[in-house]
Amino acid sequence: MFKRILVANRGEIALRVIRACREMGIETVAVFSEADRGAAYLELADEAYCIGPPKSSDSYLRIDRVISAAEIGNVQAIHPGYGFLAENAHFAEVCRSCNIEFIGPPHEAMALLGDKNAARKLARENGVPTVPGSDGVVRDEKEALAVAQRIGFPVLIKAVAGGGGRGMRVALDGKSLEAAVRQAEVEAEAAFGNGELYLEKYIEHPRHVEVQVLADQHGNAVHLWERDCTMQRRHQKLIEESPAPRLDPATRQAMCEAAVRLIRAANYTNAGTVEFIVDRHGKFYFIEVNARIQVEHPVTELVTGIDLIKAQIRIAANEPLWFRQEDVQPRGHAIECRINAEDPSKGFRPSPGTIHRLIVPGGFGVRFDSHVHTGYTVSAHYDSLIGKLLVHQPTRDEAIASMKRALAELRIEGVKTTAPLCEEILNHPAFVEARVDTTFIERTWTS
């Protein structure tokens, strides 16, 4: 087992990893930018090094500075968290070339699955359903039109290297396709340095369901069942839950087995998430693999009782999984609400500033994963996530009631947050009845 681990991230996920390491008797080295200097969670690490100015491209995304901190801190491994360098195959390769273990998948598997085109091809070859679309990259608008006419409008234009909804456009007809392709290409080039695109049939009113997978270096791979991430705005998730409501047991089983099949085919190890969409007829289709720990991983932890961060560390240390597939039986129902420093009434505009008052809810089955505190300043330089409010109860109805109570107790003053919107969503009959799709929030809350 590792003696010292560097946490190459910030905020909530950095604190989450530090806590897991402390419970495992592992020392931690934290890194921070000038914007995060003085953050309270840094005091829980054994050492902390500044790696640059506030701009992430000059600090958290600087591979050379992260590696330098790791060498100075004399660590054996690096945990990347989520975001920043977490899905950077080159970073994973650099870590291992420096004899520092990367707590994540092999860089070869990450590169393979990070290429959406290659991932879809691998899925098809292994019997994992994919959305009808182009066989590969579309070279220009003319080829895009030919593909769209073959599979039928509407179509979804997606960046090969995309994520988080960037480099993604919907075209309803041939007239709008040309502009959508150009817009997606420009956005993808700016965001990822890769403007390559492919096309998929646009599945209208889908649900978004993802499967958590763990695979060790000894040939063992298991799924930890699914999470429903349908409640999202512009492809940014807001509420997640497990088990997915109104999902046929046979569909659930087939989806989870397909996820494990794909992970095995990619020679993937460590934690990963295989994402699917489910259409109105209950058919599921592969979207992508997130080759890292997810923001919403605590939802799975609550229903399975498995600490995913500790599992990541153990797998990276070459330990075999300590349980089998039949041992993973979900218990109860868990819901997570992401509490972001955003103003939903102003188009979800970021709301940086100082938190003047913070009251955290508690009680049976309530968990709040957050690094903020009274007096904490939410920076304008980074993601707006303040924390994740979770509940775990025996049934979905009880979980909804518990979450509504917890949200009513939560007090965050000084910045606007998404908490009031989460309350509204949980009170909406369509959510209560689980008759929603990925466009529900945008259709219902038009601001």
Image: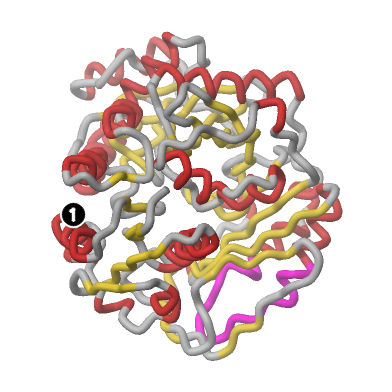
Res. 57 visible in picture: yes
Read off the residue under disc 1. Answer: 63
Asked whether 420 falls inside the magenta stretch, the response is yes
Residue closer to the observer: 171 or 102: 102
Please name the residue shown 21% across and 39% down the image. Answer: 93
Q: Is residue 395 left or right of residue 368?
A: right
Q: Is residue 356 left or right of residue 279?
A: left
Colour logic: secondary structure
Residue 295 percent location from the top left of the image: 50, 53
The boundaries of the magenta stretch are: 405-421
Residue 439 sits above or below residue 427 on the image: above
Q: Is residue 386 left or right of residue 73?
A: right
Q: Is residue 381 left or right of residue 217?
A: left
Residue closer to the observer: 346 or 260: 260
Q: Residues within 10 Å of mark 1 (few under 14, many from 20)?
A: many
Please name the residue shown 61% across and 42% down the image. Answer: 230
Q: Residue 350's quadrant in the figure? A: bottom left
Res. 347 visible in picture: no
Q: Quadrant of the C terminus?
A: bottom right
Residue 401 percent location from the top left of the image: 83, 60
Tell me the amino acid under the disc marked 1: Ile
Asked whether 412 falls inside the magenta stretch, the response is yes
Residue 348 percent location from the top left of the image: 48, 65
Residue 248 sits above or below residue 355 on the image: above
Please name the residue shown 32% across and 13% down the image. Answer: 135
Q: Residue 81's quadrant in the figure? A: bottom left
Please name the residue shown 63% across and 69% down the image. Answer: 419
